[in-house]
Image (tube, helix red, strand yellow):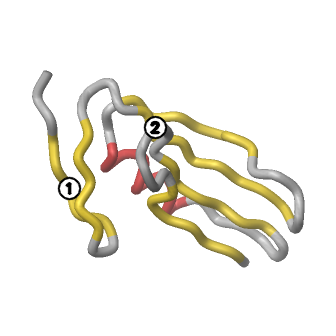
Amino acid sequence: MPYKTATLDGKKIIYSETTRFEVQVGRHNSAYKTRYTFDGNLHRAVAYFNALNIGYGYKKRLLMPGARKPVLARQFS
């Protein structure tokens, strides 16, 4: 299984075709809910994360479950 590498916000990320990326959205103090998952495609997950508009009181994050530090990106409004 070949591994791919990418850099996101100065962090080096190593992933494969089977790695799952999740885009989660939450509101105020409520828990995050997974809205979309991307298998093995970090570039598509980052593009979707950046294109997702959040309104006042919402928050979003990009996760790589199973990693030592799973949160790759986070944004609050």
**Residue denoted by label 2:** 66
Q: What secondary structure is marked by label 2?
A: loop
| Residue type indicated by callout 2 | Gly
Cα gap from disc 1 to disc 2, whole angstroms? 17 Å
**Residue denoted by label 1:** 6
What's the residue at 27%, 74% (across, down)? 10
Quadrant that contains the N terminus: top left
Q: Position of residue 11 (x, y in %)?
A: 29, 67
Q: What secondary structure is marked by label 1?
A: strand
| Residue type indicated by callout 1 | Ala
What's the residue at 50%, 40% (across, down)? 65
Closer to viewer: mark 1 or mark 2: 2
Q: Position of residue 62 (x, y in %)?
A: 52, 54
Q: Earlier in the sequence, mark 1 or mark 2?
A: 1
Q: Nearer the viewer, residue 77 or 15?
A: 15
Q: How many numbered discs sit on the rendered protein?
A: 2
Looking at the image, the residue that sits furthest to the left is: 2
- Where residue 55 sits, quadrant-wise, is bottom right
